[in-house]
Image: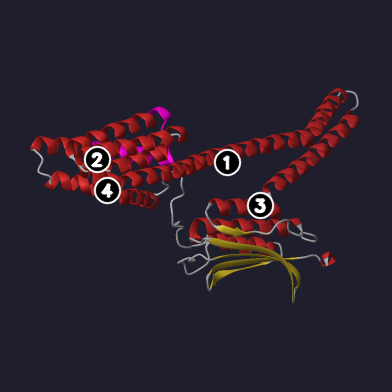
Amino acid sequence: MTEDRTAYAPEHTPVGWPARNRRELLVRVLWIGVWLVFLRGPVDDLINGGHTTAAVVAGSLGLAAFVGVYLTLVFRNIGRPFAARVVLTLGGILGILAPVLAYTLGSAWLGLFVYLSVAWGATLPLRAAYWAIPASAVVMYLIGLHSGESDAQDLFLLVLLIGFAMTGVGQLVRTTIELRKARATVAQLAANEERLRLARDLHDLLGHSLSLITLKSELAGRMLPGHPDKAAQQVADIEQVSRQALVDVREAVTGYRRPRLAAELAGTQVALTAAGVVAEVPGEPDLDGIPEEAESALAWALREAVTNVVRHSGADRCVVQVLRRHTLDGPVLELCVEDNGSGGSGNGPGNGLTGLTERLEKAGGTLEAGRVKHGFRLVARVPVAASAD
């Protein structure tokens, strides 16, 4: 139910979230793959290092195992964290392979300690990482003394700095994951509270009516043999009560289904921020003189516009305005949603815009939507009652 616009493609994969599509998966693989440049030394040593065939085979197997464990630990743990026992096990495997390979095959393999420091900094708990990273740097330096002191001196500071830098990244990932869980919990609690409120309201609406219908039905049953005229009056009362109960239920359900502009503005701020879009959203709007149907139409327009911004625009900035204006047709309340996205590739309005136009026309309003110089703009207007001025 949205217009035909280009697919939403974020410029980066959100930290702490699993890859949601192939593009995000490719971005994450490339981001991690860049750091494999430090494997150039071990690979070159295997090819041109003059090792025996047994040493080359053993080194190749050890390097493959190291890279596999490293990618599994860092790549997989970013989006869907392992249990603490699994993290410690995989980190321990890296902690064994790196010194063994560097000690037995030479200084060209000291670069493995960079990966070891990154993995430990990103995945270990802070207290464990704070001693594990310096320990790996010291072990690397001691092994370097055995094979090439200059190489060890060059890498010692790098191992320390990159390891402690990755502790910050790891903490950010863990915080993001906790925030995601907390947001899901809040949403579930809000949904449960809404269900309870609906249950209370329906009970208040129907409890008295149904009790009255039951009572009058019993009276009509007792009066029917001897006083059919009085029984008929009771049946007429039952019909009136049931009709009124039906009206009350319809009004209540309509109120639940009809969106409110203030609530949609609050949801807009949350939705745009969660999508990484810088949002400018007004506070409580002035709705004096705005019929409920007109307010509902503006709320639907805002919801549709924000959905398009988040899903399809590729924008990183969105401005929402709610203003009162005077036109030739009289005073109106205007909703304007403008983003800096690339817009759509379609030649005509989509189903979402068509539905919004019809909804606004029923409320006496209008809709304008289209590309502007630096993005896409949607403007919805509804009339304001004359007494509101």
* Amino acid at circle 3: Ala
Principal secondary structure, stretch drawn in magenta: helix
Density class for disc 2 (Cα within 10 Å; few <14, some 14-19, many ≥20) is many
Look at the image and say whether residue 71 sits in the magenta stretch. Answer: yes
| Residue 193: image location, x then y, percent | 67, 36
Residue named by callout 4? 38
**Which quadrant holds the C terminus?**
bottom right
At a point 52% along the width and 53% down the height, the residue shown is 275
Image marks 2 and 3: residues in contact by CB distance under 8 Å: no
| Residue 122: image location, x then y, percent | 41, 40
Q: Image height check: is 272 above or below 108?
A: below
Q: Image height check: is 253 above or below 211?
A: below
Look at the image and say whether residue 137 sits in the magenta stretch. Answer: no
Which circle's residue, 1 or 3, is located before the other in the chain? 1
Residue named by callout 3? 266
Image marks 3 and 4: residues in contact by CB distance under 8 Å: no
Residue named by callout 2? 144
Q: CA distance from mark 2 to mark 3?
A: 58 Å
Residue 13 appears in view: yes
Q: Image height check: is 225 above or below 103?
A: above
Which circle's residue, 1 or 4, is located before the other in the chain? 4
Residue named by callout 1? 183
Q: CA distance from mark 1 to mark 3?
A: 15 Å
